[in-house]
Amino acid sequence: MKLHSIVVVSLHSPKERIWGELLEMNTAGVTVRGIDLNSFDDFIRQVRDPEGDLVGLPTVFFPMTRVERIALDEPQGSIPSLAEMFQEKVGQSLLEYLARFA
């Protein structure tokens, strides 16, 4: 997996799934700029609100002892990836959007 890929990180203890940009991965753990997958729709609503503030994503480190798996955010047949859904609804890619906060 390459840095800056859009990924879904599955964690345990507690069970969570994080969607976002992979910033670093090593034996100690994984650093992601992302959100809990359950907040995906709310995040898109906030991004699309023309009167709201710009909303970024937090940068979070997860120790490897919590990481169950890391999957690339890819389309599955006719089902679009989350990144494709974001781009369709917002009008720009997630990485383009996040570049505003760099």
Image (cartoon, rainbow, N blue to C red):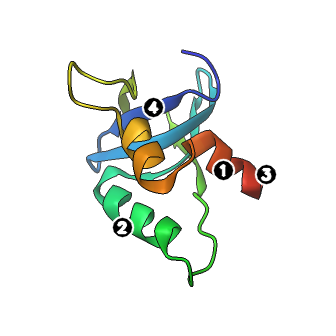
Give the Cα distance between marks 3 and 1. 7 Å
Q: Residue at x 36, y 67 (%)?
A: 42
Give the residue number, with chain letter if any, for mark 3.
102
Q: Earlier in the sequence, mark 2 or mark 1?
A: 2
For mark 1, give the secondary structure: helix
- In the image, is residue 38 above or below residue 1? below
Query: Is residue 66 visible to the viewer in this orientation of the structure?
Result: no
Q: Amino acid at mark 3?
A: Ala
Q: Amino acid at mark 1?
A: Leu
- In the image, is residue 78 above or below residue 1? below
Give the residue number, with chain letter if any, for mark 4.
7
Q: Residue at x 79, y 51 (%)?
A: 102
Question: How many numbered circles are shown?
Answer: 4
Give the residue number, with chain letter if any, for mark 2.
42
Mark 2 crowd level (few <14, some 14–19, many ≥20, 10 Å Cα): few
Q: Where is the N terminus found, in terms of image quarters?
A: top right
Give the residue number, with chain letter if any, for mark 1.
98
Circles 3 and 1: CB distance less than 8 Å?
Answer: yes
Give the Cα distance between marks 2 and 1. 16 Å
> Which of the two discs, 2 and 4, sits closer to the camera?
2
Give the Cα distance between marks 2 and 3. 22 Å
For mark 3, give the secondary structure: loop
Residue 78 horizontal side relative to residue 66, left or right: left
Q: Residue at x 57, y 46 (%)?
A: 92
Q: Position of residue 25 (x, y in %)?
A: 60, 25
Q: Earlier in the sequence, mark 3 or mark 4?
A: 4
